[in-house]
Image (cartoon, coloured by chain):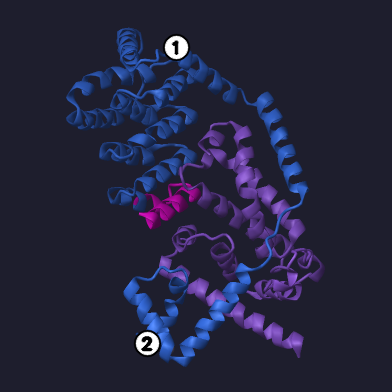
Chain colours: A purple, B blue
Amino acid sequence: MIAVRAGEIGKLGELFERHHGPLYGFFVHHTGDRTASEDLVQLVFYRILKYRHTYRDEGRFFAWIYHLARKVAADHFRRSNAAPRGTDPDDLNAVPDEAPHAADRAVTADDTARLHAALAALEPNQREMLVLARFQHLKHEEIARLYDLSVGAVKVRVHRALKDLRDIYFKLSREQTA
Amino acid sequence: MNCQRIQESFLDYQDGRLSPPDASAVREHLKVCLDCQREWAGLQEISLKLDRLPPVAPSPRLRTQFYAMLETHRRESDSHSPFVQMRSRFDRLFSALLPARPALQFALACLMLGAGLFFGTRFIHPAVNEETAREIEALKKQLASTNEQIASTNQLVTHSILQQQSTGERLKMVLASLDLKKGDQLVVSDLLSALAFDPSVNVRLSALEALYPHATMPAVRSAVAASLPRDPSPLVQVTMIDFLAASRDPAVSSTLEDVSRSQTYDKAVREAARRALAQL
Ligand SMILES: [Zn+2]
């Protein structure tokens, strides 16, 4: 990252290869929109390129990239002027059940769609923190720094988000099987 | 432990982050409490479902677009930014000029300083704020207390950067200091002077960057804190605040508090100071 800041923009390629997959996961689970998520990842790297001179805190590139990602996501929600589009089943079911032992898999396509619908129903800030903790595997300490909160407050919020997600998910399950 | 406290520790229990006694307290409680059992089972189930969501992967379009963007940027910066080119040319020039052996580097540095002093005192009269100059002198004394011998050369170095005629020349000297491995303290007061006096934002930012390895010295932190209110550029001020915040020194909090409250600072600067205070 220090090399990128110093102007060797070619090095950005390495950072892209290392981080674009996880970042894409962050946006997909946060926005529920696969196509838009690719644009948002691109936007994050554009900002890294543009603002690399402002990046100072060596060794915390990981935190910086999610700091930018959060801003990009917030802008996206402001633009589309809505929390994520509920569910677009075509979009979310796009992952084919191609594994050889598909029957063994605990999560079916229906299940996946329901889970995404439940995620989409969470309040955006709540969902964002949950995605960082559960999909991006950020430590509670890292999230605390990112949000300027105490570690205890982060734990309470992640726990709250998980409980809400569970309630929404089971409610959807009951409605769909009824 | 009561049910609420047990349930609050579920996340840490799940991650295996509880101390052994706390973990066994949760385990024991779960054996006897139906409410907590239900709560725990629900949490486990939703967590498991999240873990087992199929992974998502972007289409090849993303990679194609990224590298197209990078290529466009590279072309633009090659044609529009003489600064980047100049900087890499300086780097090459200096790696060619500087001898590889530290002893020779030191000797060469002394020679250059001597020459700088000789010409500097005879031909150039720097227009620097006297009060600031006195503060820098005081700082040099502070630095001297850690190393007497180096202090005598500090003065020479200070002259050498400030009296370079062009921004390019001064920047070159600051950048060269980034590569110095021996005699690090030699350049510290030099860099502090550049930070306090240099009219170029680029030179001041580079000086600050070169000071990062020396942020452990209290004298360096207080010098940066002293330069902060005087710097005319919000960009440099924000960078200084980041520098101070990274040092995690509680002694700088009064400066940061003043900055965060005073309306004379740019809004971005005040915000940076507030963020830094929260970090300290
Ligand atoms: Zn209980």
Kindly tell me whether residue A86 is visible in this rendering: no
User: Secondary structure beneath disc 1?
Assistant: helix
Residue beneath the point at 36% across and 78% down = B24
User: Secondary structure beneath disc 2?
Assistant: loop
Residue pushed farthest right?
A: A90
**In this rendering, position of residue B110 left or right of residue B52:** left
Chain hosting mark 2? B
**Residue placed under numbered mark 2 in the picture:** B2
Q: Which segment did they paint magenta?
A: B258-280
Kindly tell me whether residue B19 is visible in this rendering: yes
Point out residue A154 in the picture as x, y percentages from the top left corner: 47, 68
- Residue at mark 2: C-beta within 8 A of ligand 1: yes
Question: Do the residues at discs 1 and 2 belong to one chain?
Answer: yes
The amino acid type of the residue labelled 1 equals: Leu
Q: Overall secondary structure of the magenta stretch?
A: helix
**Which residue occupies the foreground of this view, B165 or A161?**
A161
